[in-house]
Amino acid sequence: MESYRYLLDIALILLSTKLFGLFSKKLRMPSVVGALIAGIVLGPAFLNIVGPSDLINSLSEIGVIVLMFAAGLETSVSDLKKAGLKAFIIAVLGVLVPLGMGYVVASFYNVGPEAWLHNLFLGVILTATSVGITVETLKEMGCMSTDSGNTILAAAVIDDVLGIVALTLVTGMADSSVDITMVLLKILAFFVFSVVAGVILHKAFAWWFNHDSRGGLQRYSIVSFSFALLMAYASEAFFGVADITGSFVAGLIISGTSQCAYVEKRIGTLSYMLITPIFFANIGLKLSPVHLTSSLLILVVVLCIVAVVSKIIGCGLGALICKYSPKQCIRIGCGMVSRGEVALIVADKGMALGLLPELFVTPVLLCVVFTTVVTPILLKLVYKKEENDPDFVNA
């Protein structure tokens, strides 16, 4: 009987995410918020009906891969090129400011001979950005193709790479087996591979879509989805870059082809029906019951505030330097707030190496959940269309 428990878990997740999503829409909030709350309610933190499992974790990982693949399909490569240098500046400041602010906060609570490295690692966790939540929210609001939306996507991809570099440098200080030079070379190789393979494969997909005269279109979506999974695997296995970056590149390669809209529609059905709700709920499922003392509660509140403010200031300042309007700067900053599964992966690495003290484990987890839930709410507030809004002039 126990071997079939996963069927009940998945059914409960799908039903609850839909119900909570409808409720959040009634409150004029993105349905993503409801899906996240559904996971918290079902999980160990409240009802304890559904718990984390290997299957749910795997489906959740596929969920965020599909989200980023869909984001790539909807993204114009030319628009992404325009945002390239600007996105790099935004991403750099979006990493440096949270890194510095996280280190300062940790320094107030953790002192000692080795404390500086532990405190620096907390800063590294705060540099993470989980763009999956932002992508789904912007799609729901019809704001994916705006100038700020494209910039958020580009900056998030660069932020991911910079985060890997920061993680490698800090873990390298604690683990002598990590070859920092090799990691950096592999990251560079990934970008070279993405550009070269991207140009060749885009032409190959375009030729196939235009010259395939056989009936039926299902093969386009199947091959495209398989390609996204292969790119996700290759980026992690061969280059050490996050799988979501590989799937996003796969989407970019297929974007602009004649069958892109069909593939996007089919991928959307797969995402909506199963794996994306599981991805959102799984974040809430990771929250366990906590007993907060007054001092720990203060640390949680401070960390949550710093997590939100540091990204808005860092990315917003970068956007301001790049001559975006003040409204766009706020939007870009808010779009980079969510830490999601990326921060959890970084935190897990830190715990394995002894870089994340027990004092910070619960606050970090609560901070991840908070930033994940609050990001769609912030985006809903800042993406109110107004007259002569620069984001919607060319959208």
Image (cartoon, rainbow, N blue to C red):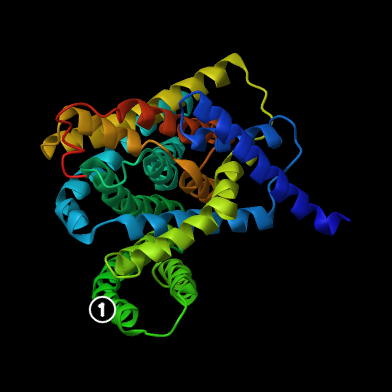
Callout 1: SS: helix
Q: Residues within 10 Å of mark 1 (few under 14, many from 20)?
A: some
The foreground one among 330 and 357 is 330
Asked if residue 335 lies left or right of residue 302, the reply is: left
Percent coordinates x, y for residue 9 in the rendering: 73, 48
| Outermost residue toward the right in this view | 1
Asked if residue 94 lies left or right of residue 2, the reply is: left
User: The C terminus appears in which quarter of the rendering?
Assistant: top left
Name which residue lies at 24% across and 76% down.
Answer: 196
Name which residue lies at 31% across and 45% down.
Answer: 144
Percent coordinates x, y for residue 64 in the rendering: 49, 53
Percent coordinates x, y for residue 24 in the rendering: 53, 28
* Residue bearing mark 1: 203
| Outermost residue toward the front in this view | 215
The foreground one among 204 and 197 is 204
User: The N terminus appears in which quarter of the rendering?
Assistant: bottom right
Classify residue 205 by image quadrant.
bottom left
Asked if residue 206 lies left or right of residue 173, the reply is: left
The foreground one among 284 and 349 is 284
- Above or below, 266 against 217 in this view is above
Say whether residue 391 is visible. yes
Give the amino acid type for the residue marked by disc 1 in the picture.
Lys
The foreground one among 116 and 57 is 57
Name which residue lies at 32% across and 53% down.
Answer: 157
Classify residue 102 by image quadrant.
top left
Percent coordinates x, y for residue 226 in the rendering: 48, 73
Say whether residue 183 is visible. no
- Above or below, 307 against 233 in this view is above
Number of numbered discs overlaid on the protein picture:
1
